[in-house]
Each structure stands twice: as C-alpha cells, then as structure tokens.
C-alpha cells in the first residue's frame, strides 16, 4: 500500500466524485479508478459503492478513511522529526486577493522568507470568494481569506487581522452622489448597488438588506472587490467593500465613504489551510510564522 494511494483515496472520499478527485490529485480518472481498485483488493473489501449517478463510502470505507488520515499524519510527523535539524525546503502555493497581497501577505512572506529561505513561494491572486474552495480542492496549499460565519470542519484558520466593511459612493456629480449628499435619511432602496457575484461580502450585504427590509436595484454583479471601487468611482452605484480594499485602490480618491450606524460587522482576515496538512513541513512552517505575527 503506497502513501500516494492513500492520498487518492482521501481525495475521492472527500469529493465523492471521480472527476474532481482526479483533478485534485493531478491524475486521470482512469488512473484514480485503477488505484482505488488496487486498494480494495489489498484491503479485501469494497471501500466505495459507485454507479453512474453517485459515489458513496461503504462502512468499511468510513473506517479506512480514519486509518488513511492517521497514517499520513504519522508519516508527515516522522519526516518532520528527521528534518528538525535541517532547514525546511519545498514549494508553497498561496492564493489571495490583490488587496490582501498588499496588506496581509507582505508581513507574512517577509517573516517566512527570513526564517525559511529555502521555501519557494508561488502566489496566485484572484477573487477572494474563491479562496476557501481553492484550498479545499487542493489547488492551493494556503490562502488568505475572510473567515465565514461557518468555517468548514476540515479547514484551519489563523487570524492575521481585521478589516471594517464600509459603504462607498461616487464623488463625481451624478444622480447617485446627489441622493447620498442631499441630507436626511438615505433612501437605500432606490440606490443602484454594485455587488460581488459570490462570497462573504455578498452574504453580509444581503443580510443587511433583509434586516432593513429593502430590496434595492442591482446595477451589476462583479468578480472581485477591486472592481467594485472602480465602478462606483464612475457614478454607476454604491457598494459595500472591505476598508482594506479601499485603502489600496487607485480610485480611493474618487469615492466617498458613507457612514452607516448599523453597517455589517468587520471581516476577520486570516490564513486558511486544510487541518490534516498542517503536519506537512512547508505548510507547518508557514502556519507557525503566521501564528507568531
């Protein structure tokens, strides 16, 4: 029984989908199927029940998943113990938004570089709404993300800081800025909103609407927070964004913050990784640095 087969098994056990599991493991679906069959032959029973519609763990598969996780954890701990006298080296894949790269990533990478100079870091930036999923799907080792109301059990979270959520409106003379600056209570239900396509920011904004019992018009739905500032600066609507995004935006001087007494709560920003991968030397080293920041 090979360790890579245990990784393949756990990927299929978590996704219950041969296509997604094979993509996660960077192998073909046929290679994954062949390795799972070899495991079942070695164990002596079926670990999965599969048909054309779905894949499910058998009772034996549930027991075997505990064995596989424990075996891989012990293997990583053993390798780490051998390397205690050696400098940690390897590749670390990191995902975050452009704004997070400016704010939260810089001190993390600086400290990591000083303590573990042989770790090769690969940075991918994109929509923060995708951060958790990219870690869960093994596309990235770690990610910087806002902590959701409910964090998946298989994920670990280490806080790096906070970011207030603020409403922004355009400064240029336009219908939106006139309604914002006319004085008195703001009629939010009549203001066009520019909102994220997905993610925690979108969820908190929608909850805020529900609390106020309003359903304002949506001008556009965009990917990523940076585009929200750009579109608001053009006078196209208002938006809710993390303040850290505004601070790092080239359009920050073209929008105004609208003070709201009952604004959604701030984001808790942190490093995210799979719990069972924290014993891996490179990810563990990064995690230890994050905890000490």
Image: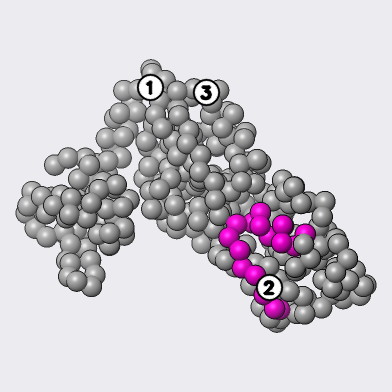
Q: Please report the residue visible at 62 percent of the width from the left and 52 percent of the height from the top.
A: 268
| Mark 3 or mark 1, earlier in chain | 1
Q: Nearer the viewer, mark 3 or mark 1?
A: 3
105 in the magenta segment:
no
Q: Is residue 83 above or below residue 132?
A: above
Q: Please report the residue visible at 54 percent of the width from the left and 26 percent of the height from the top.
A: 113
Mark 3–mark 2 distance (CA, rounded to whole Å): 47 Å
Q: Nearer the viewer, mark 3 or mark 2?
A: 2
Please name the residue that numbered disc 3 is placed on. Answer: 115
Mark 1–mark 2 distance (CA, rounded to whole Å): 55 Å
Residue neighbourhood size for the residue with mark 1, other residues' Cα within 10 Å, grouped as few (<14), some (14–19), many (≥20): few
Q: Position of residue 189 (x, y in %)?
A: 75, 79
User: The N terminus lies in which quarter of the figure?
Assistant: top left
Residue 111 figure quarter = top right
Please name the residue that numbered disc 2 is placed on. Answer: 219
54 relative position to 152: left or right: left
Q: Please report the residue visible at 42 percent of the width from the left and 20 percent of the height from the top.
A: 87
246 relative position to 3: left or right: right
Q: Are marks 3 and 1 in contact (CB under 8 Å)?
A: no
Is residue 263 shown to the viewer in this render? no
**Which residues make up the magenta segment?**
216-233
| Mark 1 or mark 2, earlier in chain | 1
Q: Position of residue 66 (x, y in %)?
A: 25, 51
| Mark 3 or mark 2, earlier in chain | 3
241 relative position to 84: left or right: right
Please name the residue that numbered disc 1 is placed on. Answer: 84
Q: Position of residue 27 (x, y in %)?
A: 25, 48
What SS does tag 1 mark? Answer: loop
Residue neighbourhood size for the residue with mark 3, other residues' Cα within 10 Å, grouped as few (<14), some (14–19), many (≥20): some
Foreground residue among 146 and 252: 252
Q: Position of residue 123 (x, y in %)?
A: 51, 39
217 in the magenta segment:
yes
């Amino acid at each position: 029984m090979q360790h890579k087969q245990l990784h393949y098994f756990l990927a299929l056990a978590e996704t219950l989908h041969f296509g997604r599991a094979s993509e996660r493991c960077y192998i073909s679906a046929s290679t994954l199927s062949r390795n799972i069959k070899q495991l079942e032959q070695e164990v002596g029973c079926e670990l999965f029940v599969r048909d054309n519609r779905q894949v499910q763990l058998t009772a034996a598969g549930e027991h075997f998943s505990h064995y596989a996780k424990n075996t891989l954890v012990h293997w990583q701990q053993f390798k780490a113990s051998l390397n205690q006298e050696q400098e940690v080296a390897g590749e670390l894949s990191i995902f975050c938004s452009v704004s997070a790269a400016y704010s939260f990533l810089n001190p993390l990478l600086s400290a990591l570089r000083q303590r573990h100079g042989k770790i090769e870091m690969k940075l991918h930036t994109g929509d923060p709404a995708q951060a958790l999923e990219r870690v869960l799907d093994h596309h990235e080792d770690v990610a910087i993300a806002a902590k959701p109301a409910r964090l998946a059990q298989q994920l670990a979270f280490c806080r790096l800081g906070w970011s207030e959520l603020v409403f922004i409106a355009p400064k240029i003379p336009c219908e939106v800025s006139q309604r914002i600056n006319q004085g008195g209570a703001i009629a939010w239900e009549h203001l066009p909103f520019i909102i994220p396509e997905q993610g925690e920011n979108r969820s908190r904004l929608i909850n805020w609407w529900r609390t106020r019992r309003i359903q304002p018009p949506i001008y556009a739905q965009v990917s990523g927070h940076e585009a929200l500032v750009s579109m608001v600066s053009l006078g196209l609507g208002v938006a809710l964004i993390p303040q850290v995004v505004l601070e790092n935006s080239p359009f920050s001087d073209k929008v105004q913050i609208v003070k709201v007494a009952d604004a959604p709560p701030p984001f808790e920003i942190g490093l995210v990784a799979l719990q069972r991968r924290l014993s891996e030397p490179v990810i563990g080293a990064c995690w230890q640095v994050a905890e000490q920041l």
